[in-house]
Amino acid sequence: MCPMGNDIMDVIPNFDETSIIGMAGYGNELAQVQTVTLHDAGANNLNFGGKSFAIQFTSKLNETYVTQPIMWSTTDATLAAYIEEALEKLPNKVVDDVSVSVNSGVHANGVVISVTFTGAAVQGKQHKLEILQDKCDEGCTPRVTGLTNIKTFTASLLPLSTVEITTAGSHNSYECGRRGKCDMDTGLCKCFSGYTGETCSILTALV
């Protein structure tokens, strides 16, 4: 199968690509944002420090990919960079670009991780990310310590750890952006005249 991408010729409701700040339609084209909230069982975000975990991404073809081990950093910017790098290193460029932010400043709110799918290969609706928080030791991959102190049950008054889609992406997603044909031998898109890019989602000329 070939990469999935936005159909550049589709009209997105309420979006005007020629508008500027303050005009109707500006900023209405949105990337999907998923918010991961992880709660420490002791309501102390620093307890995650020194541990490791992984993230599972499911593609639109329902293929699953697991990141390399991600070391937890108690510095928000560092942890965000680790997560972003791990997702973008997944095979076959299934996640070609994401933007990650982390906020762990308020212990009662947990660690809030926002993942924005900004790449051409991850436009449109995505499956929810899965946090692999269990220990994975010898003979298991990826080998992680796990987030052994994570709050995932309802025995206490603390809220559960969750993954939620907080912004629905406005892009669509089709094989080769509906502007090319898939070469099944190479897995690459052969774009129609006037279109280019890995997913044929770049307009080069009106023909």
Image (tube, helix red, strand yellow):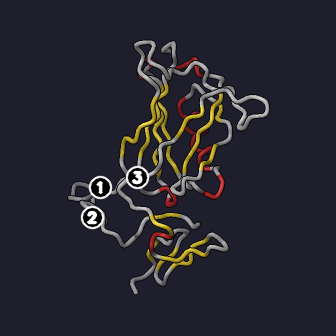
Residue 188: quadrant of the picture = bottom right
Extreme residue in the bottom direction = 207
Q: Residue under label 3, please give it.
A: 31
Specify few, some or many for label 1: CA neighbours under 10 Å numbering under 14, 14-19, or 20 or more. some
Decide: marks 2, 3 in contact (CB < 8 A)? no
Q: Residue under label 1, please give it.
A: 28
- Out of 109 and 176, give the one closest to the viewer: 176
On screen, 183 above or below 112? Answer: below
Decide: marks 1, 3 in contact (CB < 8 A)? no
Specify few, some or many for label 3: CA neighbours under 10 Å numbering under 14, 14-19, or 20 or more. many
Point out the image quarter for the N terminus: bottom right
Point out the image quarter for the C terminus: bottom left
Extreme residue in the right direction = 138
Residue 206 percent coordinates (x, y): 39, 83
**Separation (CA) of disc 2 from disc 1:** 8 Å
Going by the numbered disc 3, the residue's amino acid type is Ala
Residue 131 percent coordinates (x, y): 55, 35
Task: Answer whether residue 30 is visible to the viewer in this image.
Answer: yes
Residue 28: quadrant of the picture = bottom left
Q: Tell me what residue is drawn at x 59 percent, y 53 percent.
A: 63
Going by the numbered disc 1, the residue's amino acid type is Asn
Q: Which is nearer the N-term, disc 2 or disc 3?
A: 2
Going by the numbered disc 2, the residue's amino acid type is Asp
Residue 16 circle label = 2
